[in-house]
Amino acid sequence: MRPVAHAFGVALLGVAVFKLLGLPLPWLLGPIAACLLAALLRVPMGAIRPLNEGMRTILGVAVGATLTPAVLLSFGAMWSTLILVPVMVALIGLIGVPYFQRLCGYDFPTAYYATMPGGFQDMIAFGEEAGANVRALSLIHATRVLVIVVSLPFILKGIWGADLSNPPGLPARDIALHELALMAVCAIVGWRVAKRIGMFGASILGPLILTAAVTLADGLHNRPPAEAIWAAQFFIGMGIGCKYAGITLAEVRRDLAAGLGFCGVLMVLTLIFVEAIYGFGLAPGMEALLSFAPGGQAELTVLALIVGADAAFVVAHHILRIFVVILGAPFAARLWDRPRL
């Protein structure tokens, strides 16, 4: 438990420093920055995976609580942007695989699964089964999420003037106890049932679906309290930073550098799609950016909740992206690699 205690202490220190300096999103970016710095200084750190997954259930409940009948009726208007998600995934693959394989020198399985912007755990599992370098995959995907999560708040504030200091919900004292209890039930039951049936993204999607059903039945009228969403931010940020634990200088030169270079490619592609979507009036710019940025579903859901974006719109696009990547990755990898392996 000592590495876990180290990680917890370092993350709390990061929150305190960010709050003291008045930096944005202290509960998310503070733990990321502090744990990343500690990892580079070789401080042993670890995380409790069930606890981290449990914190993600809060985000599922938060999004599910926004799915009112009026919001569901608006889903039909999303088709014009949803159909662009598979197009973007295909372009990422066409650019990313040659980048990692030919320019960075990785073998094909590592190059392919490093490219695909799917769920972190899913890409690691698929990559390991295909014979990829699991450590390199972990660092590259951690870098992708890190760069996007850290850069987006500044983009949102700089372009749209987003207020990142807004509390993400009401304080717990202002929410009825029976609603708080119902949220907890939706989080735990939704997560466990979704995990039992093998649903991808079970810790977010299970609570989301169950909470949406309860909300539509007029059982919930609030999102989870601000304190709960801050806790989710804290553990998500700590988890991102801890993925760099034990990193070596050789890995910094190779894997971290390769991941940073690919992040540049991803950001350019994202901005092209966002500009096109906004230019044709298909969606507001802020929602388009949060929906097409290839970061982690949990991290971008947090940002959507904080800046007051349409969380349901954002989550729908990320669910489709992960669905396309998970279903298509093994099949596409076999087709792509036939002549070379």
Image: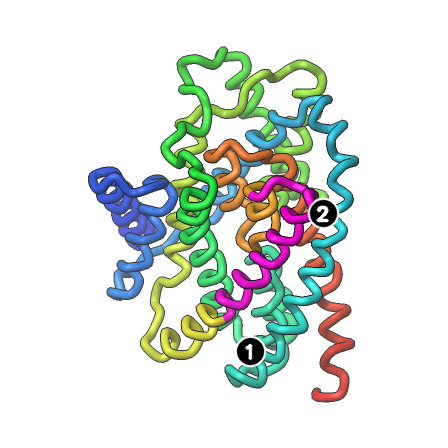
In the orientation shown, which residue stands out farthest toward the bottom? 340
Height in image: 178 above or below 52? above
Contact between marks 2 and 1 (CB within 8 A): the answer is no
Relative side of 149 to 6, left or right: right
- 281, 169: nearer the viewer: 281
Q: For the residue labelled by badge 2, is the local secondary structure a helix, a strand or a loop?
A: helix
Height in image: 336 above or below 25? below
Q: Position of residue 55 (x, y in %)?
A: 48, 38
Height in image: 321 above or below 68? below
Q: Quadrant of the C terminus?
A: bottom right
The residue at which mark 1 appears reads as: 100
- 101, 289: nearer the viewer: 289
Crowd around label 1: few <14 · some 14–19 · many ≥20 (10 Å): many
Relative side of 268 to 64, left or right: left
Height in image: 242 above or below 157? below
Identify residue type, mark 2: Thr
Q: Residue at x 59, y 55 (%)?
A: 119
Q: Is residue 271 magenta?
A: yes
Image quarter for residue 244?
Answer: bottom left
**Most frequent secondary structure within the magenta stretch:** helix
The residue at which mark 2 appears reads as: 81
Q: Is residue 143 magenta?
A: no
Q: Position of residue 310 (x, y in %)?
A: 59, 34
Q: Residue at x 28, y 52 (%)?
A: 34
The magenta region covers 262-285
Identify residue type, mark 1: Phe
Compute the Cα span from label 2 to label 1: 28 Å
Q: Nearer the viewer, mark 2 or mark 1?
A: 2
Q: Residue at x 54, y 15 (%)?
A: 179
Q: Position of residue 266 (x, y in %)?
A: 55, 63
- 190, 324: nearer the viewer: 324
